[in-house]
Amino acid sequence: MFRKLVSLDEAKRILEQNFSPKPVGVERVSLSKAHNRVLAEDILSPTDVPPFSRSTVDGYAVRAADTFGADEDRPVALKLCGSIRVGEAPGVTVKKNATAEIVTGAPLPRGADAVVMLEYVDHKGDTVLMHRAVSRGENVMEAGSDIHEGAVALKRGQTLSSREVGVLAALGLTKVGAYKKPRVAVISTGAEIVEPGKPLTPGKIYDINAHALSAAVTECGGEPVSCGIVPDEKGRLKATLREALDSADVIVSSGGVSVGPTDVVPKVLNELGEPGVIVCGIAVKPGKPTTIAIVNGKPVFSLPGHPTSSLLMFHLLVRPLILSMAGRQEETPVTAKAVASAKMFPARGRRTFVMVSLARDKSGRLLASPVALGLSGAITTLAGADGFVEVEESRQFIKDGEEVTVRLFKPVSVIS
Amino acid sequence: MFRKLVSLDEAKRILEQNFSPKPVGVERVSLSKAHNRVLAEDILSPTDVPPFSRSTVDGYAVRAADTFGADEDRPVALKLCGSIRVGEAPGVTVKKNATAEIVTGAPLPRGADAVVMLEYVDHKGDTVLMHRAVSRGENVMEAGSDIHEGAVALKRGQTLSSREVGVLAALGLTKVGAYKKPRVAVISTGAEIVEPGKPLTPGKIYDINAHALSAAVTECGGEPVSCGIVPDEKGRLKATLREALDSADVIVSSGGVSVGPTDVVPKVLNELGEPGVIVCGIAVKPGKPTTIAIVNGKPVFSLPGHPTSSLLMFHLLVRPLILSMAGRQEETPVTAKAVASAKMFPARGRRTFVMVSLARDKSGRLLASPVALGLSGAITTLAGADGFVEVEESRQFIKDGEEVTVRLFKPVSVIS
């Protein structure tokens, strides 16, 4: 099959023109499963929070006006008319020159509009001496002061961390509309690929990509759907891709895309539906054989078989798309400034991604050292890297000692 | 109960003296569930990766020495002796002045030590013309060059991201030893607390803390164990705490610790076992009533009932402990430099945490604005905050316009 390499930016542009990632649907999830999901609806508060005015201290509920002028030396005497407990409707109304005992969190009784703290009060029989004046609303959390009934408490698109889960609970909600996780079919191709756990006969290697890519799908909010290992054989591959297109929102395969006599993935993709293959080879290193197709309105990414290449291309092309389809905001890449510890070359005419590990030298400078440069087949290249340096195709080289921006796989605590 | 406030640093020191957080155990997890778990063992490679020397290109397997001197104009002629397919043991041995067709990923046949790429070869019947010389090992990924048999492929304590999951798959492993998730019992106390979904009778509010704290436990690698809502009543509370101590590694309760007539948590904790309460009140705002106990060797955190206070104290005291017990490395807090948009005061003698939201002003400066200062009962205070500013107890105040360090709840993409 004829391959016309396009640049990475061009590949992204072609993908954008042919596919607009949108959330794939909405489902109701229970409060206990809502953590880390993305809200698919604005949450309007069905109630005031708190639902009633509450005392924020232990003390005495009063009409603030009754305490005017009270101080340490000249207390105001009020008549005790009852006691308010937590979790119950107040049984009393506080009338003029009266007061009721109250504890933190208990509802303010009718008539009262403030609370005098315990430490400013002398209690003698039915008479309570207030040694301090309070103003209206003092030591009271008003009904609805946290969230008003009908107010937008949380917005569509918010990811539910522990704090937002707290807001949902405050509203008494047990179910919430969340974006469905996009289903991502993961297919490994190649006659040499064997599932871990099975015996390795001569010429076989274990399937790395299905497991690494499935975990990568989970990391960006998708739901991996395992479609197993298929040989580079047209009929089997076509059947598997057809099944995957029926059951998933995005298809990611790996292997079977090098320019070899047994490469069938691009051919099969063109046969499955229009427009078929839209990108067939990208001018990047590693990752050149990456193929992108749209079939029946669904994106299919055919990534290289080499683990480092396939995970890198997933990171650059597939992850942003899955994030959008999961309703998640685009990420700001986490980067670190470092000093190149070796010369870094771009492959001729191709944007090159150099996997680097980070460490501080004696003088405290952060050094970016290439990991096993060029071994894109090695999974350890990737596992040993903290991130990568992007070398523009137009650059001649990056000098040893030059400052580089390292895009981190995750915030690295050892470097701080 | 008498409360002697200690500083936050002193509280941490006392906790450290009385409890050394250690991983709570090891369990075997399957490869498909290993993502985001923490390795409890060094992983020694049971095999070479790759298990055999593989061609990294499509081309012809040769003895490198046979190609010496070959170039565009003076090709070397070798005799075709066979074809090597992917996933099978090579059926041929490459003898002197012979060559075998090979594809990417196929095992190098005996005798051969390099591969000439397809594009430098003319194939005419049984004769293959090599237009380029190769050196030993060229275009070959040697057996074990990624990971040697017996080498440490991954280390104890590593968190398994997609990249490390790929390494496990490469080794053919289907099970791996991971640290058990510490079980964290979550208890809500208070006669006014009602489970979301139930009707709110007068004086009742929904249980925010159990849900927010359970999600927070998940966020740091623990497994929340819901122990429900108990009233501030000694017998019930004691029974629930006893059950929690039997079934969990850490106990987190909220509510019932203000200095009020119905506060029973600290008393019950002292009755349950030695040494009982070790910290009874911390000089922080919010979070002052926070109580820490050790009972039967297990830490019990009794946090305030106010959602912002309890989540903040969880963040500062409980989260680091759960991370350690989950075998996870201590985190570097994510911070941002910003300019205070308002004066911030510490509460007298107490370290004060001011919840702030971040936004850029017209000139591009990042502003930290206090969120609903003082309303520690409000869940929206927390949900509306991007992080917090720590005001030292010794500070008089932070000036409007002063630079502050904001500890972020998560990296905030809107600010970049």
Image (cartoon, coloured by chain):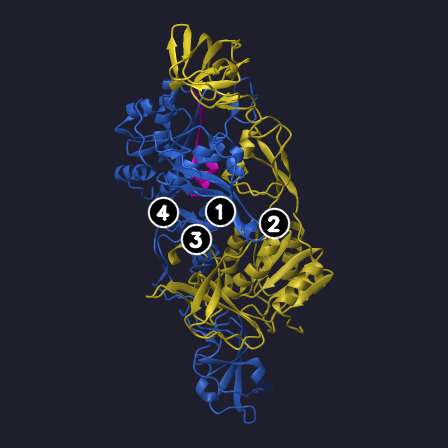
Chain colours: A yellow, B blue
Look at the numbered discs 4 and 1 and tell me whether their residues touch, using CB distance below 8 Å. no
Q: Earlier in the sequence, mark 1 or mark 3?
A: 3
Residue under label 1, please give it: B401
CA–CA distance in space, label 1 to label 2: 48 Å
Residue B315: x and y, percent?
42, 40
Vertical side of B254 occupied by A401: above or below: below
Three-letter amino acid code at disc 4?
A: Gly
Can you name the residue that lies furthest to the right here? A274
CA–CA distance in space, label 3 to label 2: 22 Å
Are the residues under marks 1 and 3 on the same chain? Answer: yes
What's the residue at 62%, 27% (across, down)?
Answer: A149
CA–CA distance in space, label 4 to label 1: 41 Å
The quarter of the displayed image where residue B25 is located:
top left
Identify the chain of the residue marked 4, using the numbered disc in the image: B
Are the residues under marks 4 and 1 on the same chain? Answer: yes
Three-letter amino acid code at disc 3?
A: Leu
Q: Residues within 10 Å of mark 4 (few under 14, many from 20)?
A: many
The numbered dot on residue B97 is none
Q: Earlier in the sequence, mark 4 or mark 1?
A: 4
Are the residues under marks 4 and 3 on the same chain? Answer: yes
Three-letter amino acid code at disc 1?
A: Gly
Find numbered disc 3 in the image and state the secondary structure of the residue it sits on: loop
Q: Earlier in the sequence, mark 4 or mark 3?
A: 3
Identify the chain of the residue marked 2, using the numbered disc in the image: A
Are the residues under marks 2 and 4 on the same chain? Answer: no
Residue under label 3, please give it: B160
- Closer to viewer: mark 2 or mark 4: 4
